[in-house]
Amino acid sequence: MAAVATGALYVSHRLFNVAFKRVNYVPETSAEKQKYAQQYYDYVDWFRKVPHETWYLHQNDPAKRLVATFIQHPDHLKKTVIISHGYKGNRETMANYAQMFYNLGFNVLLPDDRAHGDSAGQYINFGWLDRLDYMAWINKLIDIKGEDEKILLFGVSMGGATMEMLSGENLPTQVKAIIADCGYSSIKEEMTYLLKEQYHLPEYPFEPMVSTINRRRLGFYLGDVSAKEQLKRNRRPILFIHGGKDTYVPVRMAYENYHATKAPKQLWIVKNATHAESFWYNPAAYQARVASFLKTYF
């Protein structure tokens, strides 16, 4: 029995490191999204060339410093979207969404989360601690742009879940609406699902062990935090988007999140899209759906 327990602990530490430890590169995208590579790099090229500023939180503390790109729209329409990137991505990987919102007349603020891109941090926290950083970015944005700035929150995958987790906080009145694309319902549910689907491992004993390691490193058990629970406290209009063929964050989680919130809400399932593919599947339809939601609620 001791050997089994030791083996399980070893595997759990390996799993934690694979899932939670910082990597200083963006992993290759999934096979089904490789076909969009040229379009993706065109957006990145735009992102690098468009006039922008670099903003910081905790600028003078190398252990806590967080970095963001701010793009000012030339029309100065007093509206900004804050965009939250996906797992092991960074602000540049959201260039396509940045351009879409810029074309819709928004200023754009794109942070790098903890342990991603140019921001500090050793461990990925799957949005739970990041939500507090986004509160700080919101406050910084209001300080710089003024009390009359209207704010939209937007995120994809882990970023979608981050914005869902943020939705339950006491948000400033300047935050008018939220769009969450393919966010998971909770870190524990997502972890348990991937254990089974990707590693063919059972929930027990691995999820509780990984959760305990996370508690020691990041201060919370995975089961203690949930996008669904936060969404129950949400008061902002919210649009949920999810690919109907998503096998990474199963589409049932979109329905769970949708049913959890009592605020004005819309759900758009993009029938043939895989994980985080909804935009790429039909960019014009995606922009039109977002614009329609904004016309109603923003």
Image: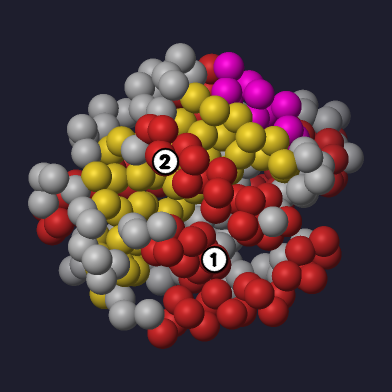
Residue range corresponding to the magenta coloring: 249-259
x 59%, y 73%: residue: 25
x 61%, y 39%: residue: 241
Q: Position of residue 204 (x, y in %)?
A: 77, 26
Total labels: the figure holds 2
Position of residue 224 in the picture relative to residue 80 (left or right): right
x 22%, y 39%: residue: 174
Q: Which numbered dot is residue 294?
A: 2
Crowding around mark 1 (Cα neighbors within 10 Å: few <14, some 14 to 19, many 20+) is many
- The answer to whether residue 95 is above or below residue 261 is below
> 141 or 132: which is nearer to us?
141
The nearer-to-camera label among 2 and 1 is 2
**Magenta stretch secondary structure, dominant:** helix
- Is residue 15 at all visible to an observer of this figure? yes
Crowding around mark 2 (Cα neighbors within 10 Å: few <14, some 14 to 19, many 20+) is some
Q: Position of residue 31 (x, y in %)?
A: 83, 64
Residue type at numbered disc 2: Leu
Residue tagged by mark 1?
Answer: 96
Quarter placement of the C terminus: top left
Q: Residue 68, located in which quarter of the rendered image?
A: bottom left
Residue type at numbered disc 1: Asn
Q: Position of residue 194 (x, y in %)?
A: 76, 40
Position of residue 260 in the picture relative to residue 47 (left or right): right
Q: Residue 178, located in which quarter of the rendered image?
A: top left
For marks 2 and 1, the one nearer the N-term is 1
Quarter placement of the N terminus: top right
- Looking at the rendered structure, the secondary structure element under dot 1 is helix
- Looking at the rendered structure, the secondary structure element under dot 2 is helix
Marks 2 and 1 sit apart, C-alpha to C-alpha, by: 18 Å
